[in-house]
Amino acid sequence: FLERDPHGNVQVSLIESEKLFSALVKDVLAERKAKGTYIARMDADDIMFSNRLEEQVCLMELQPDVDVCCSWASILSNPSKVIGCGKGRIQEPLSELLINNIFIHPSSMIKRDFLLKHKLNYKNYQYAEDYKLWFDIAARGGLFWVIPKTLIKYRISDNQISHKYCQEQHKTAVRIRNEVLLAILNSKKVAELDTLQSIYKKMEYLNEKGLLSSGAIRNIVYMIYNEIKQNM
């Protein structure tokens, strides 16, 4: 947790427990009554650069409307390999999440007040709790920012959830993407919503006939949605 003392200095408390991290918002905020402004996420087997917290805190204080700040990451076993999607303000997080989870969870810093205001926490979405949290934040108007720098070193191993339970994780991810799809199709903020819904119904018919996959439908909605937004 990050909070400032009366002199304006940032104070950091380290909680070394993967189980606590997995229930970070629900348990730590409720039981420990954290008073910090931001919550910084970190996996126990990853390594963050010494400037990570400073960079994220500075960004979020310079951009006070930002609710989630993530970064890119380098791979511990291959430092020259960088992973990360997007940079700067993510203009349409919902549409991005319709296709994939573009945010690197252990690089994230979240504004605590936003979570409390909307009563958000990690939900039981097996092996994809972070993906679900990003959707919940985006659906409530949360603003995302990605710092295009490697601020953490990310470990990839055969023991990771994404490797050991990849099929289960994929099923949960598809469930979340379908929730994102419904959120877009029912959003009052989308121009030409009736037209988009009409196109979707026709695609559903093709899906029932086995002529169009669910993934293709999401990709088409993603393209149409972004075209609409760009022309607004």
Image (cartoon, helix red, strand yellow):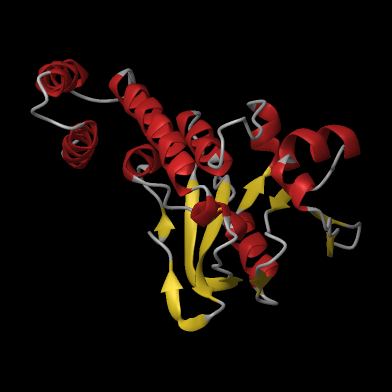
Residue 140 locus on image (x, y percent): 50, 29
Quadrant of res 99: top left
Say whether residue 37 is visible: no
Q: Is residue 101 above or below residue 231?
A: below
Q: Residue at x 51, y 53 (%)?
A: 162
Q: Residue at x 53, y 41 (%)?
A: 128
Report how many numbered discs are placed on residues in the image: 0
Quadrant of res 190: top left
Q: Is residue 57 above or below residue 115?
A: below
Say whether residue 3 is visible: yes
Residue 98 locus on image (x, y percent): 34, 38
Q: Residue at x 56, y 48 (%)?
A: 68
Most foreground residue, 133 or 192: 133
Residue 4 locus on image (x, y percent): 83, 57
Residue 70 locus on image (x, y percent): 54, 58
Most foreground residue, 62 or 120: 120
Quadrant of res 55: bottom right
Q: Is residue 161 above or below residue 92?
A: below
Left or right: 22 as drawn, with respect to 208: right
Most foreground residue, 217 or 141: 217
For the C terminus, the image quarter is top left
Q: Residue at x 64, y 56 (%)?
A: 61
